[in-house]
Structures are given as structure tokens and as C-alpha cells.
Image (cartoon, rainbow, N blue to C red):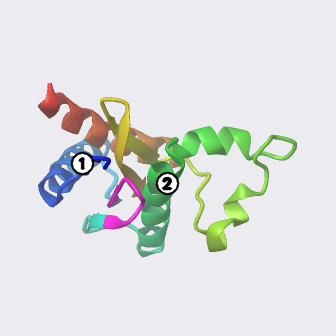
């Protein structure tokens, strides 16, 4: 039998809270999605002025980060024309995100979930997701 650690709803809320702090700091309201290790949604928060069109994008970024166990920036770089994963964004019914802003969450080298943020630029989305993951990991130490 394998024991697999997973993010809890409380963990997800903690990550969202840290993401919101960073989003407010950079003055960009975000859509924030948290998934478990298999990419299934645990929690979602849409800040007041976040883009409606970014709701699904944030979920797709979190799904990609958890399911692929890589940041969506890694896929951004590798999915450009002529690169090894070109066209991967069309896989899984278009759910696979190759836009920065999706960060996997690893605890002791084991995937426990994914964070996806959207509504800003790709760099802003990634910055907010990274802040959420970093704050969560800091609580474990």
C-alpha cells in the first residue's frame, strides 16, 4: 500500500490567502485555483476584479502543474514552434496550459497539488502562484 500526502482544504485556503496578499501587493486581482496531486480542484477564489475569462484558465494551469508535475512556464518554453512539446496545449481537450502561472506543490519531493493563477500577465500570474506555494512550504518548516 502507498501512503500519499495530499493538500487539505485548510492547506488550499492558506495558499489562496498568500496568493491574495501578493496579488494585492502587485495590484492585480486574480483567479486562484488549487488542485490535489491528480489535478482535481480543491478550492477556487475569484478576487473582486479578476477577469471572468481567467476562471477556467487558472483551473487549467493548476491542473497542468499537478498532473504534469511541472510549472506551466516549463511547458511555455518547451511548447514553442520547433520545440519538443509543440502542440501539447491541444491535448486533453485543450485543458493543458502552456502559459506561466501554474506551479506544482511538492512536499519532500512528492507532488501534493498544483496552484494556478490568472488575470495578470503571465509573469504576474506566476509570481502570485509562487508566493502562495512559498508561504505554504514555509509553514511546514
Relative placement, left or right, of 77 versus 109 is right
Neighbours of disc 2 within 10 Å: few (<14), some (14-19), many (20+) = many
Nearer to us in this view, 26 or 123: 123
Q: Is residue 108 magenta?
A: no
**Quadrant of res 33:** bottom left
Callout 2: SS: helix
Determine which residue is flagged by label 1: 24
**Quadrant of res 12:** bottom left
Determine which residue is flagged by label 2: 67
Compared to 94, does 127 lie above or below? above
Q: How many marks?
A: 2
Q: Which mark is residue 1?
A: none
Write the start and end of the magenta stretch as one range.
33-41
Callout 1: SS: helix
Residue at position x 16%, y 60% in the image? 9
Relative placement, left or right, of 60 versus 95 is left
Rendering coords of residue 126 (x, y %): 44, 42
Mark 1 or mark 2, whichever is nearer to me: 2
Report the Cα–Cα distance between label 1 and label 2: 28 Å
Residue at position x 38%, y 51% in the image? 114
Amino acid at each position: 500500500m502507498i501512503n500519499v500526502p495530499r493538500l487539505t482544504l485548510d492547506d488550499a485556503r492558506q495558499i489562496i490567502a498568500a496568493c491574495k496578499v501578493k496579488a494585492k501587493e502587485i495590484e492585480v486581482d486574480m483567479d486562484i485555483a488549487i488542485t490535489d496531486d491528480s489535478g482535481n480542484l480543491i478550492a477556487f477564489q475569484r478576487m473582486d476584479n479578476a477577469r471572468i475569462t481567467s476562471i477556467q484558465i487558472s483551473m487549467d494551469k493548476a491542473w497542468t502543474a499537478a498532473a504534469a508535475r511541472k510549472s506551466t512556464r516549463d511547458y511555455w518554453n518547451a511548447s514553442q514552434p520547433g520545440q519538443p512539446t509543440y502542440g501539447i496545449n491541444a491535448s486533453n481537450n485543450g485543458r493543458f496550459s502552456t502559459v506561466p502561472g501554474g506551479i506544482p506543490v511538492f512536499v519532500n519531493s512528492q507532488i501534493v497539488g498544483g496552484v494556478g493563477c490568472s488575470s495578470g500577465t503571465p509573469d504576474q500570474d506566476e509570481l502570485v502562484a509562487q508566493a502562495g506555494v512559498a508561504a505554504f512550504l514555509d509553514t511546514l518548516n
